[in-house]
Image (cartoon, rainbow, N blue to C red):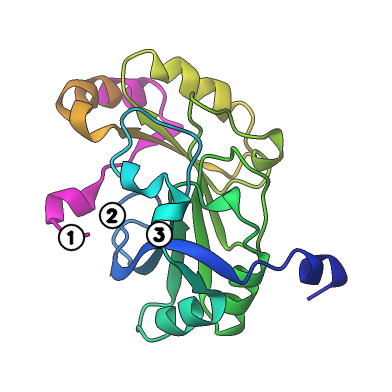
Amino acid sequence: MNKLEMKNKVDMLPVMEKFYTIQGEGVHQGKAAYFIRLGGCDVGCVWCDVKESWDADAHDKQSVADLVAAANEFEGKLVVITGGEPLMYDLSHLTTSLKEKGLRTHVETSGAHPLSGTWDWICLSPKKFKFPLEEFYPHAHELKIIVYHKHDFKWAEEHAAKVNDDCVLLLQPEWSKEKEMLPLMVEYVKQHPKWKISLQTHKYMDVP
């Protein structure tokens, strides 16, 4: 760890929940994964399904050492850091410690806060309520756009124009609008095959 990382070392993080399950959405859908959901979010999506995560003070802080030890107990070696908005915190110490145990590090972020940490996979999911920082676009491995209404296809293309050529482009219906939006998404992807459809399969499977 360099001097800057030592100076900014964050050893305690507010944790809403942590659990071992199946990744339900995105490129890595279907894989065993350990999730660490951090508390705290200032993005404020009206359709957020984990609004209880927004208040960081409502969740107990846990040490990086304890989080890494818990993640390392399971056979699956993929760890997903999510929220809330996980990059409200400097995650350099957490990701370095996870990788020292041979664990893969994935993050799910809106990109609204500075990028920190060492990541094997960055899922960027831009939100209209607080735009992503420009620094995220060249680093994103996966661009996941939540489709809430038909105007979101234009929003999706605006962000797709900024990511690198290897970034996977995903359209995912907001859960409460799935029946309405999915037929539109199917037609859109047929006409714009650079995109793929992502579904929240964990909700179909009734797993956390």
Instruction: Name the residue beneath numbered marker 1.
Output: 207
**Mark 1–mark 2 CB contact (< 8 Å):** yes
- Element marked by disc 1: loop
- Element marked by disc 2: loop
Q: Which residues are magenta?
A: 186-208
Q: Mark 3 vs mark 2: which is more N-terminal?
A: 2
User: Marks 1/2: CA distance?
Assistant: 8 Å
Magenta span has 5? no
Let me know if residue 40 appears in the view: yes
- Residue 59, which numbered label? 3
In this rendering, the answer to whether 123 lies above or below 97 is above
| Residue 166 pos. (x, y %) | 59, 45
Quadrant of residue 134 in the image?
A: top right
Instruction: Name the residue beneath numbered marker 2.
Output: 24
Q: Mark 1 vs mark 3: which is more N-terminal?
A: 3
Let me know if residue 39 appears in the view: no
Q: Mark 1 vs mark 2: which is more N-terminal?
A: 2
Would residue 94 appear left or right of 176 to someone viewing this image? right
- Element marked by disc 3: loop
Quadrant of residue 50 in the image?
A: top left
In this rendering, the answer to whether 162 lies above or below 23 is above
| Residue 70 pos. (x, y %) | 41, 81
- Mark 1 closeness class: few <14, some 14–19, many ≥20 residues within 10 Å: few
| Residue 192 pos. (x, y %) | 41, 23
Tell me what residue is drawn at x 43 percent, y 46 percent: 55
**Mark 1–mark 3 CB contact (< 8 Å):** no
| Residue 67 pos. (x, y %) | 47, 76
Identify the image quadrant of the N terminus: bottom right
User: Marks 3/2: CA distance?
Assistant: 24 Å
Q: Nearer the viewer, mark 1 or mark 3?
A: 3
